[in-house]
Image: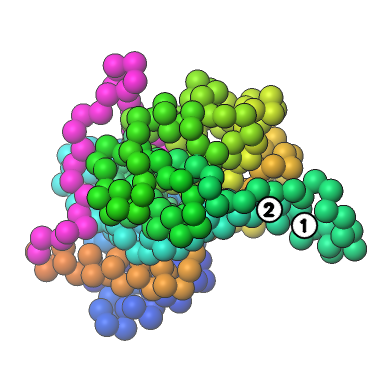
Amino acid sequence: MKIAVFSTKAYDREFLDRANRDFGYELVYFESRLSEETANLAQGFSTVCLFVNDIADRAVLQRLRAGGTSLLALRSAGFNNVDLKAAAELSLPVVRVPAYSPYAVAEYTVALMLGLNRKLHRAWQRTRENNFSLQGLLGFDMHGKTVGIIGTGRIGTRVTHILAGMGCRLLGHDLKPSQECEKLGLRYVDLETLLRSSHIVTLHCPLTPETFHLMDEARLALMPPGAMLINTSRGAVLDTAAVIQALKRGHLGFLGIDVYEQEADLFFEDLSDQVVQDDLFQRLLTFPNVFISGHQGFFTREALAAIARTTLENIRCIAEGGVCDNAIPPPPVPKSKKGGQVKFPDLIA
Ligand code: NAI
């Protein structure tokens, strides 16, 4: 079977090639992102394999279908970049890797909290210039602080475990409460109570029509002055313009993000020789209390090995006509906050 693998880097090839020794598929790697312009590269490939910033909207899916593609295999947990309704209409099954290493993202989330709190990014720069002053580096004990976890699924649960071990008070908000988290002392509350009561808020819900710009101006204003906000889920769960205003006012004390609303134009590429045109992103970079990384929460050896193996297992399962547990069911018709329908491309991170 020929598989077109989009958005590939050397590390993707390394782990996919290793996993493929047990499968023997013909993997053809493309560095390009999947988009309307590049969809023709997949002509004649029965399976197309994509990652978080590949675009699989209706127009792209139509091209893929016309070119003979019959399966979309995501190398990610999140699937907000795929128009599932269009995929269903085109009879294109979509499979994903729902759990490759929740530890990778959870541990990275806590690293962001600790790094921002203890200002490691600033300390690193200072000591390189023989500046050993502690002025401005004052942090706080995590022990005893209240952390609000929005989304207590696989990753949120691992974050709960780590923070419980650090002696944090834990609040949670989720559509489906987790008994495992409750046993660790996490108390479920409504979103408003969580935001009003937490020193740190961390986002672990998927990007859906309901969570698009979940953290908007009004909800940011509910957070106590000086609080910390962490986002390792998907960029568009935060309203970036509103976050910048909250930072400028001094209301939001810290921001740690591994994902960004418009990251598809930036992340995973070396743009150090270019002038980045995204003014919102450039403004975010100017704050001393903001730490940004380029979607690396998942990036551990264990996670890459699991992603590669599960992706190929998913493909084999569908190819052999089996029922794949990792197939994404087609969505119900979504409603926006204002009651109208949300067009899926609006939500592509
Ligand atoms: P999961 O599906 O196990 O958990 C998500 C949780 O969010 C579920 O418990 C669900 O009930 C809850 N949820 C859904 N809608 C909600 C809402 N409106 N309000 C509150 N809670 C809601 O997913 P998992 O594996 O924990 O991943 C979470 C997200 O993390 C993914 O959707 C993905 O976007 C992101 N992610 C980021 C990575 C990175 O490298 N930064 C890597 C992997 C995932």
Contact (CB < 8 A) between labels 1 and 2? Answer: yes
**Magenta residues?**
322-349
Residue 331 covered by magenta stretch:
yes
Q: For the point 39% across and 30% down, which residue is it?
A: 191
Indicate the position of residue 108 as horizontal and vertical percent values: 52, 58
In this view of the protein, which residue sits in the foreground, 49 or 144?
144
Quadrant of image for the N terminus: bottom left
Q: Which mark is residue 118?
A: 2
Mark 1 vs 2, N-terminal side = 2
Looking at the rendered structure, the kind of residue marked 1 is: Ala
**Quadrant position of residue 208:** top left
Residue pointed to by mark 1: 123
| Vertical side of 141 occupied by 317: above or below | below
14, above or below 151, in the image: below
Q: Is mark 2 within 8 Å of ligand 1?
A: no
Q: Is residue 303 above or below residue 181?
A: below
Q: In this rendering, is residue 276 above or below 163?
A: above
Furthest toward the bottom, the residue is: 21
Q: Nearer the viewer, mark 1 or mark 2?
A: 2
Left or right side of 10 for 244: right
Give x and y (percent) for residue 40.
Answer: 37, 52
- Which residue lies at the image location 48% right of the left edge and 68% below the top edge? 300
Find numbered disc 2 in the image and state the secondary structure of the residue it sits on. Answer: loop
Q: From where the camera sits, is residue 50 visible?
A: no
Residue furthest right as drawn? 130
Q: Is residue 327 visible?
A: yes
As rendered, which of 93 and 60 lies closer to the eye?
93
Callout 1: 10 Å neighbours few (<14), some, many (20+)? some
Which mark identifies residue 279?
none
What secondary structure characterizes most of the magenta part? loop
